[in-house]
Image: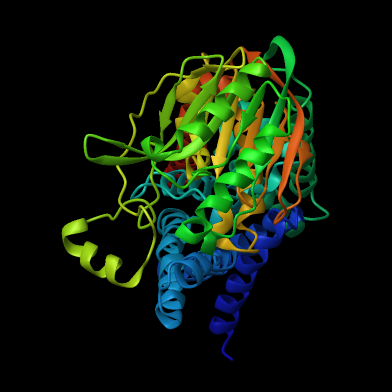
């Protein structure tokens, strides 16, 4: 094997290893070390094109390992032929790997021929470009921020930066840490190397201090909650023969608890709202009123010929609705339908796969004495969208169905993403899921209670509403983008200064 091929192989392995830094594995130093390896490879690349190739290899490994569970959704539950599903999964990973490739190209194209201060390239340019392209990935097409490296630090000191700069700020801290580590090693036994170690310790120490700050304050008294995990197998969820059993399972699980707020998963009752048996609706509503509260239920809705992935409430409060706004491409709507619709419908069998979007700005649900901001499944991946409901919202609730991905790590990764949303917003996050991970997450991003996956159960606990604003809620992603711009601008000015001197 040639030296060049070995470098690409190393980049691929480094990207593959990153999956072990995320939940459920949680070996958080791995993404930092993997990125450090990529930075060294980028530094040694001789052309922007080779740097782009290394970034593509790293990204291919990162996404193939991290989101490989979509193969299960397409083949096992979507009935896509095996080879076609495998090819689609690899192409999906390869598409998103183009952004790490672009990051490699950009940092090399503009800074490779600047030999005087390569330390700044590693410590500032590479981290800034990496974080910038992660942010851009959250916007491209309809956005796909999954496997953003900041999520791997949900339980580390670096998570302290989330309430200030959001998850992309945490990613920037990971990337800067990787750059400082590389430079400290390369400049070991020298004053610059020692200063890099000090900077690394200060970066992590500042994050630890930020984690001790209570950015928001409790609102009213704690109250009881019940998060229902029905554990309905995905191949049965929309099976007409299993419908009666599904409805009975959720009826039974709701009726056996006395919580003020009961939450059911995404499309827990696999019918349209107007098709639900009236006796079931009355039973659930009466039970919620007896508990002095409300029940939040995931269903589909039809309105003026359009179909929505929705949630509605029953109980002491008037019935209220939330409709999912950020839909999943190919799962909930078909992009470029005139060109792709015939093909997607022919090879992929996903019930209700062409839905309408709810409004981008929807009122919070006034239930159980709280102002609840509901987000459905994939929506909680977009922190800049979650904060639209703040500061009005006192509580975040996510309802989801990750049964599509079987026993892959995706459900655990999704729960980890919710930890960052709690940190960013300074609000508790309640997650009710079909097969897991069902959890109660505190404002500090820590998991307070959690159900095991693939079991039928109800997570009973207490929640607390919060009020106030974190810096991230005030600024959104503008703060981290400004920081990235300053890092790149300062380095570029230093570069111009060096050229002028010479």
Q: Position of residue 496 (x, y in %)?
A: 43, 42
Query: Can residue 53 be seen from the camera position used here?
Result: yes
Q: Is residue 229 positioned above or below 446 on the image?
A: below
Front residue of 213/433: it is 433
Which quadrant, please, contains the N terminus? Answer: bottom right
What residue is at 60 percent from the left and 29 percent from the top? 424
Q: Quadrant of residue 342?
A: bottom left
**Furthest residue to the top?**
220
- How has the structure been colored for display? rainbow
Query: Can residue 433 be seen from the camera position used here?
Result: no
Q: Position of residue 346 (x, y in %)?
A: 28, 71
Front residue of 67/184: it is 67
What residue is at 63 percent from the left and 37 percent from the top? 431
Front residue of 36/401: it is 401
Q: Position of residue 269 (x, y in %)?
A: 50, 43
Q: Is residue 182 left or right of residue 473?
A: right
């Amino acid at each position: 094997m040639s030296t060049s091929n070995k470098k690409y192989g190393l980049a691929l392995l480094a990207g593959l290893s990153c999956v072990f830094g995320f939940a459920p594995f949680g070996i958080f130093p791995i993404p930092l070390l993997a990125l450090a390896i990529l930075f060294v490879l980028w530094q040694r690349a001789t052309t922007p094109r080779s740097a782009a190739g290394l970034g593509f290899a790293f990204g291919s490994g990162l996404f193939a390992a991290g989101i490989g569970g979509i193969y299960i959704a397409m083949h096992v539950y979507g009935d896509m032929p095996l080879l076609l599903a495998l090819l689609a999964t690899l192409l999906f990973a390869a598409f998103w790997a183009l952004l790490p490739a672009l990051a490699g190209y950009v940092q090399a194209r503009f800074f490779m021929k600047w030999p005087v201060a390569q330390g700044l390239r590693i410590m500032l340019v590479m981290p800034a470009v990496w974080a910038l392209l992660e942010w851009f990935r959250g916007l491209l097409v309809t956005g796909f921020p999954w496997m953003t490296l900041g999520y791997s630090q949900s339980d580390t000191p670096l998570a302290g930066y989330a309430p200030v700069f959001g998850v992309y700020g945490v990613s920037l801290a990971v990337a800067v840490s990787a750059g400082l580590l590389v430079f400290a090693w390369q400049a070991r036994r020298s004053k610059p190397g020692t200063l890099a170690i000090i900077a690394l310790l200060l970066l992590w120490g500042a994050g630890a201090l930020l984690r001790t700050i209570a950015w928001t304050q409790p609102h009213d008294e704690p109250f009881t909650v019940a998060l229902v995990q029905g554990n309905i197998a995905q191949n049965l969820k929309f099976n007409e023969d299993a419908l009666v059993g599904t409805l009975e399972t959720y009826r039974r699980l709701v009726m056996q608890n006395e919580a003020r707020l009961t939450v059911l998963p995404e499309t827990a009752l696999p019918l349209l709202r107007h098709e639900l048996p009236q006796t079931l609706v009355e039973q659930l509503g009466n039970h919620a009123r007896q508990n002095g509260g409300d029940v939040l239920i995931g269903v589909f809705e039809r309105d003026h010929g359009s179909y929505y992935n929705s949630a509605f409430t029953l109980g002491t409060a008037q019935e209220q609705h939330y409709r999912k706004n950020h839909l999943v491409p190919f799962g909930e709507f078909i992009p470029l339908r005139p060109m792709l619709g015939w093909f997607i419908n022919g090879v992929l069998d996903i019930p209700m796969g062409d839905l309408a979007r709810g409004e981008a700005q929807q009122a919070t649900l006034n239930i159980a004495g709280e102002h609840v901001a509901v987000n459905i499944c994939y929506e909680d991946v977009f922190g800049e969208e979650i904060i639209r409901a703040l500061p009005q919202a006192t509580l975040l609730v996510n309802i989801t169905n990750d049964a599509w991905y079987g026993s892959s790590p995706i459900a655990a990764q999704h729960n980890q993403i919710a930890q960052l949303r709690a940190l960013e917003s300074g609000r508790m996050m309640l997650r009710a899921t079909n097969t897991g991970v069902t959890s109660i997450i505190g404002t500090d991003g820590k998991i307070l209670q959690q159900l095991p996956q693939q079991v039928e159960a109800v997570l009973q606990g207490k929640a607390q509403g919060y009020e106030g604003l974190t810096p991230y809620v005030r600024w959104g992603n503008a703060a981290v983008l400004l920081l990235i711009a300053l890092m790149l601008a300062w380095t570029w000015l230093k570069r111009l200064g060096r050229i002028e001197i010479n």
